[in-house]
Amino acid sequence: METSSPKPLIELKHVSHEYFVTQSENDLVLSDINLTVSEHETVVLLGPSGCGKSTLERIMAGLITPTRGEVYYKGKLLIGVSPGVSMVFQNFALFPWLTVRGNVLLPVGHLPAEEQQARLEKVLQTVGLGAYEYAYPRELSGGMKQRVGIARALIAEPEVLAMDEPFSALDVLTAETLRNEIGRLLADPNHPLRTMVMVTHNIVEAVYFATRIVVMASGPGRIDVIVPNSLPYPRDTDHPEFKKIVEQLHGILTHTTMPDTVPADTNKVVTTTTPDNRRRIAPVSLPYVNAAEVLGLMSLIGDEPQDLFDLAEKFGKEFGAVVRIVKAAELLGFVQTPGQDVQVTQLGRDLTNASTVDQKRIVREQLMKLKIFELLVRLIRVQENQCLPSEELIRELQAALPHEKPRPLFRTLLSWGRYAEIISLDQRRHVIRLYEAKGAGRTRLAAPLLPPAAPPAPPTDSPAPPPVPTEPSPSPGELPKS
Amino acid sequence: MDLVVLGGIVALFFGLSQITSEWRHPLNDTAPIDLSLSALPKYALFSFARGWIAYFFSFVFTVFVASWAFYDPRAHRYILPALDILQSIPVLGFLPGLTLTLVALFPHSNAGLELACVLAIFTGQVWNMVFSYYDSLRGTPGDFRMLGKLYNLNWWQRFWRLELPFGAQGLLYNSMVSMAAGWFFLSVCEAPPPINGVSLRVPGLGSYIQAATDSGDTRAKIFGMIAMGIVIIVVDRLIWWPLVVWSRKFKLDDFGGSRAPRNPIQLWLARSLAVQAIGTAWNALANKILGPAIPPSAATSLVEPGAPLPERSRVGRTVYAVFVWALIGLLTWGCYSLVALLRSVKLGDWEEIIADTGFSFLRVLAAVLIGTIWTVPLGVWIGLNPKLSNRLQPFIQFAASFPSPMLYPWLVAVILFVHGTLQTGAVLLILFGTQWYILFNVAASAAAIPNDIISCAAILRLSGWTRWSKFLIPAILPGLVTGWITAAGGAWNATIVSEIVQIGSTTYKATGLGAYITNASNANNFSKLTAAVIVMAVVVVAINRVLWKRLQNLANDRCRFMT
């Protein structure tokens, strides 16, 4: 579209960013990002939640100074807040005690009064808020609030408009209207604003706006692929070319967030003789979801293979959230994910048809195949009184999985372990014990620790002998029926 | 109607001129108190002004210290624990020493006495305000901070446009609590227990009532108390109440404040031309003073690649370093002189102090216990009846605000009537200063029990002891513990004024740490006084750490309703 070569506006060079957690613990959110935003471009940062896309956008605006790397604006090194960038926030960030007028005029207080007034009228016309000048934000609907947010960003006449999930807090219909209006703004060659950086997790939204789509991957946040999109504005979401790009992004995101290789590795048993060894060969983490979500997925999914993105739509959930649930289900052997399809396994079908007690048993058996639960049980066993303090588990998790956030992982582990009756947590003392069923039918949970006789999941490499000897006392009720 | 507003302003200026002339008055150890009724408004005004001057300092201190703790992570680690300790120190114990020092500093004017009084009130007001403001600084939503950065607000603009509005509600609530505590200290510090045999006095309602008591003028005594009550009501209705209504606009959630009750007075205020004019003028003035935020420009935030980075100004850092070192130096010197002072305290004195602490401890315990026994059932009953609690809340607030030392002469009369002594009777005096906090907090937390839980308890037919032990007591426990902490802190302070009471020429005494402190200051024995005050501070802090803090954590951990 652009005839002359586009001038670079924002350049990121080897940008990395860490959040300080504690003295010894830092959270790497962005790793070695190189990206250029040129004039008359709309760059959309797309990725699952937690991939650092919002942080990246704030770094571009100069609101966050990256721990490493440089940001250039128009060829000069950026050392403070960028002079040409305005921002629109997901949750509007309007001052409740200022009227629409007061909120919108905030960034131009240094201009002469007439100029302020002229700009205000123009910008309120643009976003369709002419009649709301003296309204307070609380009187406005979500869509109207975001219009105020956009007006406040536009009144400064920025060179770059940065938007952080601007439509996520709105209902579907309002978001659609507002999207169309912004789309028209971008298509209007007379409007001065021609450069935009937008953060979103919505693929259609990305394709609708972007001239380039930057797909990001998480853990730590990095750029996966950049997809160019040269469709002319205004764009038609039903156009075959449009759908083709959406499909392409579906494929990329599936691959980024759910590589087909991961599940195969998880059943590999790692020999853990020395603590040193354990730290080097890390167990795979559990996605941060709970049992009810996975069971819900299993009962809703049906027998036919389903497209991941259709599922997300069907559940009305964010794509990244659905991916997490599917990943957890896959880790436990309940589904397989060839490409971007989700296919229920035989075990998954058994699970759906099982009684509540049997469901717990199946989940327990599957969990006990994971390294991370093996680690957990072993940690409890080596305690003198078989009580593992919570903080100690958090420390161990941090050492074993340095790239994961220890506390969310701890909570996830606990929620699964308690659901499956592997462990119990004493909240009064903050210690974790192995679960012992009350009553005669069951004794200390030991059966799943022994390599189960005939679970449906494919037994991969030869299982190493359990590191801690266990009392061989499986009660009859515990043995899996084949 | 606009005349009322105007009249208020004129009265304010007149009062100010009166107060300044009083401050420049030459030192007057025992200010003669005019017991006639016509003098009362003047004394009320003096007391009122003292309370507000102290509040002004409290406010400035709050903003400064809380911001310091928030923005400087290194200082943060020391400031918060330090505040926590300062909060639990019995201020009244320091009052005699403070008064003597300040009077010595200003030997030729009343300023020293006045300053001591204001300082005492200040220390009674300030701590909870600091904690509240610090919390609201931490709670300011990140997006708004980003916005402030984006518009390049300087610290002054950030404070007015961002931090103060977000902190307004919490700060206001705590200001009301602080002011109530302030009246207590005011009533004591205007006519402190005699120091070195000399009764120092500053004119005000506290000293008026003391003088009336000394001279046995019952009529003046009653009218003095009525005047105090009027001051409290006026402050509550004319200052706090409009501010509370106004501060609702700073509520962040959109739905809470949207249906703010519009009563006729508010509408009248909103439409009054004078108020509107003041509002407009105020806005214009504020905008002028604050100035617009200058957006970031290429000159300030961009440098040529390869060019050296601009150096930050060093002035601020130097000033800060000097300030911190001065503070450290002062602390060191303070510790040194303290140790020197304490060396002269004999072993026998320490033994006496410890024994007296035991007596006072028992009294505090008894006061808290008695307070709990009668206020918990009443508080729960009030809290569970919304109508009743709306109607009674102002009265409880009033009772909590009313400075109990003004009631002491009456209470002592009651004790003597039943042939009691102050030895046990002091518990009653302490009780009157502290029970309201328990009642207040219990009623508030009972009112906050979710309806579902109440229905559930009713369906389960909980009754009698089960109802209390399984439902009501756990449900109100967080509030009850807060009430206990406040009450116990107040009780230790109250021992200082209630274990030794002078009425007319008769002095009633009880054995206890409070009486010991008062005696030491009366005898001008500075080392004994310091030792006793330190023991009291240590005991209070230790009890806080060992008992209250743990209880509070436990209550908040287990007995808090999720919202």
Image: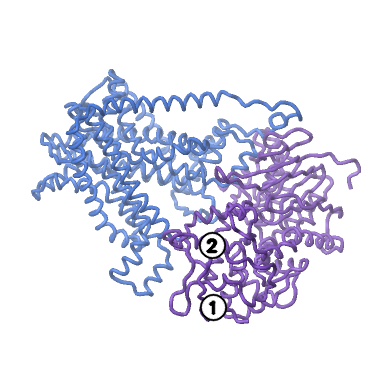
**Chain containing mark 2:** A
**Residue A329: % across, % down:** 66, 69
Q: Is residue A235 above or below residue A315?
A: above
Say whether marks 2 and 1 touch (CB < 8 Å): no
**Residue A11: % across, % down:** 77, 40
Q: Is residue A404 above or below residue B426?
A: below
Q: Residue furthest top?
A: B108
Q: Quadrant of residue A67?
A: top right
In the image, B220: left or right of A417?
left
Residue drawn at x 55%, y 58% as measured from the top left: A410
Task: Look at label 1 and name its amino acid.
Answer: Glu
Q: Is residue A242 visible?
A: yes
Give the labeled residue for mark 2: A378
**Residue A305: % across, % down:** 75, 74
Question: Which secondary structure lies at badge 1?
Answer: helix
Rendered shade, chain B: blue
Q: Is residue A317 visible?
A: no
Q: Is residue B254 above or below residue B520?
A: below
Task: Look at label 2 and name its amino acid.
Answer: Arg
In the image, A78: left or right of B19?
right
Q: Nearer the viewer, residue B190 or B510?
A: B510
Q: Residue furthest right?
A: A3
Question: Which secondary structure lies at badge 2?
Answer: helix
**Chain containing mark 1:** A
**Residue A74: % across, % down:** 78, 35
Q: Is residue B162 above or below residue A187?
A: above
